[in-house]
Image (cartoon, rainbow, N blue to C red):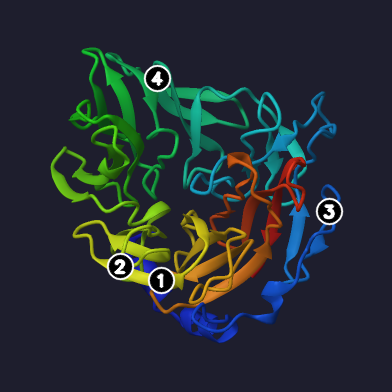
Amino acid sequence: MTRIARRALLSSAGMAAAAILCPSILGGRSQASSVPTVDPLDYLVPATDPAFGNKIVKVTNPNGPVPGFDLTWGKVAIHHYSIDQAWNADQTLLALDRGTNPRLFLDGSSYKPMMAPPRPGEVRWHPRRADWMIFLSEDKAGMWNVRTDETVVLNSLTGYSEPSLGDHKGNPSDDGRLIAITARRSDGKLVIFAYNLETGEKQRDIDVSSEHEVRHTTVSPTGSLIISYSMATSERESLRWRIFTTDGQLLQTWTDYERPGHGDFAIDNNGDEVFVGRSKSKPEQWQIIKRRLRDGLVTTLSPPCTASHVSARNLQDPRWVFATFTEGRNRPGFAPYRSEIAAVAIDGSGTVRQLAKTNAVANGYLTEPHGSPSPDGRRAIFASNWGDKDGVIAAYVAEFQ
C-alpha cells in the first residue's frame, strides 16, 4: 500500500466510526475488562469471549494427535512472535513455529492442519505474494513456494556466513522488495546490508563489528532505512537504536533505554515511518509511544499500561497497532487493560478496541502471549497456558470486526 493510499484510509470515515464504537483508553475501566474467561476451550470449537463478545478458537492441541498427519503436538504449540506475520498475504494459510517437526501450516480460516513441508531456512511471509515466503539459509537467500515446495535462489551469499533476518526479528519492507541481512563477512566482521529481492541489488555493508552485541535489525516499512538495536559495551546502559540509510549513512542514534522497545515499525496517519512500542524511559515511561524514524519525535498513544509487546503486522489496515497486555498490577494512573489483546489507534487519539482475554499466566518466555494481527486486522493469534501456570501452551485466534 502506498503512502497516499494509507493517508486516504486514515483520513476516511473509518476513524470517526471507530471513535464512536470503541471506548477510549483514557477513559475509566470498562465493566467487560473484569470478566474472566478461564474455562478450557476445545480444539477447533469456536467459543465466545464473555469479556468482549468476540469469537475465540483454539487452533493447536498440545500433546494431542495432529489430524491428518502422523504427528503429535508438543506441549508448546504456538506461532513465532508478535512482529512476525503468521498469516500469508491473502490469509489462506497460517504458519506455526513450535509444536511439530516439521512445522505446520494451518488453513487460514478453518485452522485445520494443511501441510508440513520442511522449511529451507529462516522464513518470513512475502507481504504480497500469497504462496511465497522469503528465506535465508546458511549459504543462500531466496523465495520459497510453500504449496509446491519450489525454491528460487536469489543470492548465494558468497563471502558471508551465519545470515539472519535481524536476529530472527527482522521483516521485509511492506511491499516485500527489500530485506536487511545480518551476517558474518569472510574477514570475520559482523555486517548488515540491504538486499533487493526483485532486482538482486545488494547495498554496501554496514560494519557493526565494534558493537558488543547486535540484536533486532530490520529494514523500515518503505525500505529506505535500516534500524539496528545493539549493545555498545557489555553494560545494559549501552543499549541503543541506530538508524541508517540503506547505503550506510547513520541518521539517528537513540540511547534512551527502550524508548520504545518490544515494538514494531509502521507508517502512521501522517505518512511517517515510526517505531511503536512501550517506553521504559522517562518522560513517557510505561506508555505506548510512536517515535518518528527520521528525527526521533515522540507521540504518546496511551497512558501508562502493562503492554508487553506491540505489533503492526496489520498492513492492510494501518489505523491501529495491536498491544498485548500482561496480568500487570493495579497501579494508580495505569490504563485498566490487563491479560488481553487490544488495538490502539496510531493517530494519538487514545482510542482502543478491546479484543480478547488471553488468560495467560506468566511462567517464562514461552507463556508470553505475543499477540499478532492478521494482515487485514480482523484477527489476532496469541499464545496462552489458559490459566494454568505449568500447563500446556496452545495458540488461539481471536476474530473480530
Q: Earlier in the sequence, mark 1 or mark 3?
A: 3
Q: Estimate the spatial distance between the alpha carbons at disc 3 and disc 2, rounded to whole Å.
A: 42 Å
Q: Which residue is mark 4?
A: 140
Question: Closer to the camera: disc 4 or disc 2?
Answer: 2
Residue at 78% across, 70% down: 50
**Gap in Å between the C-alphas at discs 4 and 1?**
40 Å
What residue is pinned by disc 3?
Answer: 41
91 vs 344, left or right, is right
Q: Tell which tag, 3 or 2, sits nearer the viewer.
A: 2
Label 3 CA crowd tier, 10 Å (few <14, some 14–19, many 20+): some
Q: Is residue 320 above or below residue 140?
A: below
C-alpha distance separating marks 1 and 3: 33 Å
What kind of residue is marked 3? Leu
User: Mark 4 or mark 1: which comes first in sequence?
Assistant: 4
Q: Amino acid at mark 2?
A: Pro
Residue 25: image location, x then y, percent = 51, 77
Residue 311, can we see it?
A: yes
Where on the picture, by quarter, is residue 52? bottom right
Q: Secondary structure at mark 1?
A: strand
Mark whose residue sits in front, 4 or 1: 1
Q: Quick one: label 2, few (<14), some, or many (20+) residues within 10 Å?
A: few
Residue corresponding to mark 2: 283
Please give the residue where the numbered disc 1 appears in the rendered image: 301
Looking at numbered disc 1 in the image, what kind of residue is underneath it? Leu
Label 3 residue SS = loop
Q: Secondary structure at mark 4?
A: strand
Is mark 1 in CB contact (under 8 Å) with mark 2?
no
**Where, quadrant-wise, is the C terminus in this rendering?**
bottom right
